[in-house]
Amino acid sequence: MDPMSLESLLSEDLVAFEHQWTSFFANFDTEIPFLLELSESQAGEPFRSYFSHGMISSHITENSPNRQPFVLFGNHSTRENLNAGNFNFPSEGHLVRNTGPSGSFAKHMVVQCVSPKGPLACSRTYFFGATHVPYLGDDNKLSKKTEQIRLLSQVYAAVIEAVLAAIACYAKTSSLTKAKEVAEQTLGSGLNSFELMQFKAALCSKMAFHIHAVNNQGRIVLLDGEDSLYFVKTACMTVYDIPDLLGGRGCLGSVVFSESFLTSQILVKEKDGTVTTETSFIILTAAIPRFCSWLVSVIHQVEDIEVKLSEKTQQSLTGDECFLGTFLTRGEGAYLYSSNPQSWPEEGKVHFFSGGLLFSDRHHGNIIISKDHMNSISFYDGDSTSIVAALLIDFKSSLLPYLPVHFHGSSNCLMIALFPKSKIYQTFYSEVFSPWQQQANSGLSLKVIQEDGLSVEQKRLHSGAQKLFSVLSHSAGEKRSPLKLLSAKLPELDAFLRHFAISSISREPVMRTHLPVLLQQAEINPTHRVENDKVIISIVTGLPGCHASELCAFLVTLHKEYGRWMVYRQVMDSSECFHAAHFQRYLSSALEAQQNRSARQSAYIRKKTRLLVVLQGYTDVMDVVQALQTHPDSNVKSSFTIGAITVCVEPLSCYMEHRFLFPKCLDQCSQGLVSNVVFTSHTTEQRHPLLVQLQSLIRAANPSAAFILAENGIVTRNEDIELILSENSFLSPRMLRSRYLMYPGWYEGKFDAGSVFPLMVQICVWFGRPLEKTRFVAKCKAIQSSIKPSPFSGNIYHILGKVKFSDSERTMEVCHNTLANSLSIVPVLEGPTPPPDSRSTPQGSSGQQECYLVFIGCSLKEESVKDWLRQSAKQKPQRKALKTRGMLTQQEIRNIHVKRHLDPLPAGYFYNGTQFVNFFGDKTDFHPLMDQFMNDYVEEANREIERYNRELEQQEYHDLFEQKL
């Protein structure tokens, strides 16, 4: 079961499940005047209808008696009937009045509700009649019938305690055998505590216990199956066919109790490297009342002790001389809490007297607490009208016989909660507070305490009451959240959900020191202070062309007061985005240099060293974090700490097409890693649509990230600088918890960041000749018009590198962003560089290849990239072809004519000034020897071409990539 399935189970299935129980109780409360005539069929109708309709819609057939609803009265709840496997038998004849011993009325009933389309199920044992006798100022004797009910309720209480102990044991050990042993031992101890030792052997011999795993469709599966850890389990104990232990004949029936629970296990790595298990569990059906009883008025019964006691109680309260003293006030809406973890608060009416109080509710009758039975009585209201007022009663053991069995607790503590704005809350202050503060004849007076005066147990009880009040006091127009109401009913739910959120992600262990932070139980110590001798790492990352380098240069140049800077830039002159081994070697060398420098400097001039890691590419930031976590030298690992991770976002370079993001775009902004998102363009325009849309998208991926506007990487606010250079943002509890939830195994370098899709190819080409700047700029600008849609094959999105141009001797750093159509050409700044990486050295180099360019795009091929780059260099001269007369142009012919038209004429020709005339009077525009002149011109031109070609052949040429021709 994953967290989403659990949320659905809690907010939908469990709400519907509890609704069926509410209908069940409402049905009984309506039938109280006719309770004796109620049949099993009528009582179980809500459960059967709920189950049968759900089974039809879900097409599930489960014949196990453990997955069937039932309601069985008194001695009809035998082993045979409970194990029948089908509870659709007619039961109109089994009534409350005829299913007790010797045909008398039933003393109890066993009930089970089952979710038809889910894993939830629970069973309860409820009682017909009083399980206790109110204190009336003297020793009241219980009748045999009431003693039977009280004995059954004590057995039932011991069964509840046994099941809960078994669940706790199973959650810790995952062993059914050990859980069963604990259940048996706890049942025996519980019977001993109720002084039922003489019945212990008889009862334990009739006990059955099991734990079943149930999948999300409601089918029972193997408990030790591979996936059973995340399935809901049901733990059930039944004591079958209990005889009349008070000497009577016949069988009283069986007692049944079961709960559905869910466990959670987190593997924890200790300091010594061993792995242990941290467990938690939640009883999902715990909000279903475990104890309930209805007073039965037996008609035609001569002696009815319950009715007489009820009448005597009312007479004592209304008489002139009440044993509780003077009547002060009464009111509804009070809640009675017990220190017994098995019990839940009971809502009812409270009557205050000068010498004690009476609490009454419809399911347990009257509970009278005299000051004679109190050791102390305290009052806490938090000095606020929004805090639940608590009347805390520490009572004597002499009160136990006069309390329902589920109010018996180890600390003998009761709490009456008075909700703010209720009538009883107001009348208590006006009518009870002052008289109870004054010393009374009993010697007890009300003591007002503050929060620090509450015991741990009292704080737990008050916290539960405060949660319940917060949920119930929502405004009329506000929709009540099912999870909030469940949280009030199940105080352990919030803690379990935090535990389950961690355990359900993976089976990778978490560090022991991190566990309290992940469970939100404590803050992490190093959050606020980082040791001075540690090197702070600030990581700046982003997609290519995001201006991360500009932000880095800005930080280093203008903010030297933060300490001594070291800058690591990823190795771009290769086909990979990030080299973990190269980064680890750099950290080792940087630490060695730092230690040597510190040894030479005195303490008062020593500056804190900071490392700025700049990454541009389709690199997952988690790879960088894991490279530090998995450094082979533990000394190096412990000497560095990540302060904050900042991602730069260029809005124009986020989408490949329409709203299709570049790979790793959102991954680089994910929560748990990134503290700041710097937008490096469109920041000067008020709410640019593209910027607003991206901010909304990134906010959904990382709700807690700080947004910073920095046009072209220039940050203008000091507070933004402080965020980027924070020393503890990465170690904050919120970030740490998010990392464990989103990147299981990250601390030990086991998280796989996943592949890049669409696959972005990074091709690095080395060359030794300068480029023609004009040709290179024109080629870059022309790329945008050639971008193709999906599947984007052959598209070049980014060009990065260092080159030389023919018009300068300086090496220039080049960055081209195709989609933004921006080209940056700036001189390379001299400075330290990361240690050389053997993998980045070009193969076949003659030592002259000092320029390189990295092309990033989809489905790129090296030869195609090289052909594209060759066109940006100075082109090799081509051989000239020899001329022929047919290749002469009209202009060339005219030039020949102009040059030689005055040459001597052959015999028989003369020139009249405009034309050439022969002996016969024929006239021409060209010289009679023009053919010879053209042949001479062609011969002369070919001699020049041949000389040029000979000189060209004698020269040695190399192309851009040093391939000799």
Image: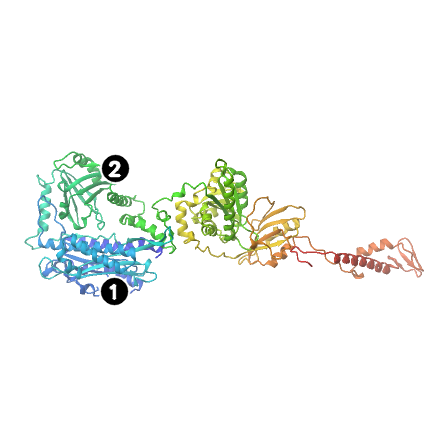
Q: Nearer the viewer, residue 948 or 196?
A: 196
The answer to whether marks 1 and 2 mark residues whose Cβ atoms lie closer than 8 Å is: no
Q: Which residue is drawn at 25% across and 53% down?
A: 286
Identify the residue at horizontal 91%, vertical 54% (top origin).
912
x 79%, y 61%: residue:
886
Q: Sequence order check: which comes first, mark 1 or mark 2?
A: 1
- Position of residue 459 relative to residue 787, above or below, is above
Which quadrant would residue 879 be assigned to in this image? bottom right
Residue 635 locus on image (x, y percent): 45, 48
Q: Position of residue 328 (x, y in %)?
A: 15, 38
Q: Mark 2 points at which residue?
A: 450
* SS state under label 2: loop
Which quadrant, please, contains the C terminus? bottom right
Amino acid tagged 2: Gln
Q: Label 1, on which residue?
A: 64
Residue 189 x/y as whole percent: 18, 54
On screen, residue 5 versus residue 588, left or right, reads left
Q: Judge from the rendering whether residue 740 lies leftward or rightward of residue 874; answer left or right.
A: left
Viewer-nearest residue: 308 or 742: 742
